[in-house]
Image (cartoon, rainbow, N blue to C red):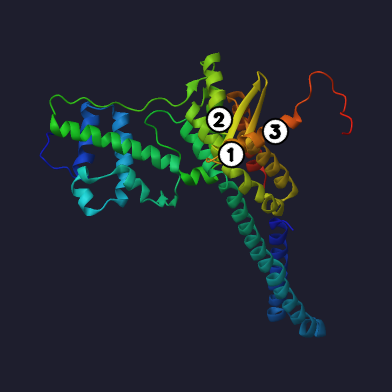
Amino acid sequence: MSRLFIIALMVVFGALGIGLWLYFVFGTGGGQFREELVPELVVFCIEAFFLVGLLGLIQRHLEHRRRKQMWLSLRGSFRDLLSQLDIAFLAPNAEPTSSRELERDPRVIDHLLAELERKHPDLDSLVALKREGDESLSMTRDLVAVAAQLSATHMNWWIAIVDSIRRLAEATDRRAMEKAIHEMLVNIREFDRLEF
Amino acid sequence: MMPDGSRSVETLLKFLKFAGMEGLINPAVARARRNAVEQLAAELSEEEREDVMRIDVDELASRFHKLEGSSIRMEALSLYAERFRMALVDFLAWSEDPAGFHSVGGEQRRATPRGSLTPEQEVAERITLESTENPSNIIPIQLRSDETVYVANLPLDLSADEADRIARVVRAFAQDNGSDEPEGDA
């Protein structure tokens, strides 16, 4: 159920409940319907308001938070790879990107892609990236199950990311490494674009 | 600003600010070093704060378990440590001889513009990248120009007899150049 639908239901039950209660308190006539059925309907509306509405919203909020935590766990698993790339393209005397941005900010990926289009990382950076890819591979592979909990699409993009990290770890020349880095960044960008 | 004999971290930070403003050090370099000193100063002891000569930058970096509220990124920590080291070199040089002070300079560019690599460089890089794949216990033996075999886990105290035994196993794989007919039963 979408959030808007739940809110609409809450408004309907809330308005109906208040209307019936006002009718019960201030209304005239109606006989047995007003005396016996209206209080029942008011209680029904109150129950519906809380059970369907508030509890539904709370559950949605908790679920969203849980999924956000999963996304952050996944996103943080290749922070060190992004950090190595960040340092590789860092201009002299510039400040490295903060850990928080590397872990959460999708704009970092666009920045790294733009840098990769303009520059070649030096050999030390390539060696460090290759080692980091080798170290990150098993961990990112283990997280496929976590990505699958978000959605099938998340899992597919996650597998693509893992595959590009594997290619990065196995590459033995600059061209293959830069291609793998580019693929990895593009896959991460697609992963970031998915809604959870 | 002139040296007053103080070698505290506070004086170091003041020096970096002054040197950047006065043009003794490139302002961007001074700013980056100030930031590095501020980042690493969190783990300094009182004695080290009072006298920067006591600081061993590598040892200081090893004390960190957290940077910017997050777990350590070794590459970022190394960058800050290197900048801290350069800041100390400049500060001590200026303290000794302010009139003849020359900065050790800023950082080198890490990345190079696209299309600036030579074929020779690429070949050298390939060798380096391939060598990272070979742990020290794997010995590459080039058979032909396009064929390399790897021998793994040879013990350091390999005897001549054992080497002979390995050679016999390898020889068993070799094809006879004369003919490839199977030998008859003895």
Q: Where is residue B35 in the image (x, y as percent from the top left)?
A: 32, 40
Say which residue label 1 marks: B154
Q: What element carries label 1?
A: loop
Depth check, mark 3 against mark 2: the one in front is 3
Nearer the observer, disc 1 or disc 2? Answer: 1
Amino acid type, residue under disc 2 in the picture:
Ser
Mark before the other along the chain sequence, 3 or 2 = 2
Are there few (<14), some (14-19), or many (20+) residues within 10 Å of tag 3?
A: few
- The residue lying at 53 percent from left, 30 percent from top is A126
Look at label 1 and name its amino acid. Answer: Leu
Query: Residue B131 shows which numbered tag?
Result: 2
Q: Which amino acid does label 3 sit on?
A: Arg
Q: Pinpoint the chain carrying mark 3.
A: B
Where residue A64 appears, as percent x and y from the top left, is 64, 57
- Residue B168: image tag: 3
| Left or right position of B36 against A21 | left
User: Furthest residue to the front?
Assistant: B186
Cα distance in 3D space between marks 3 and 2: 28 Å
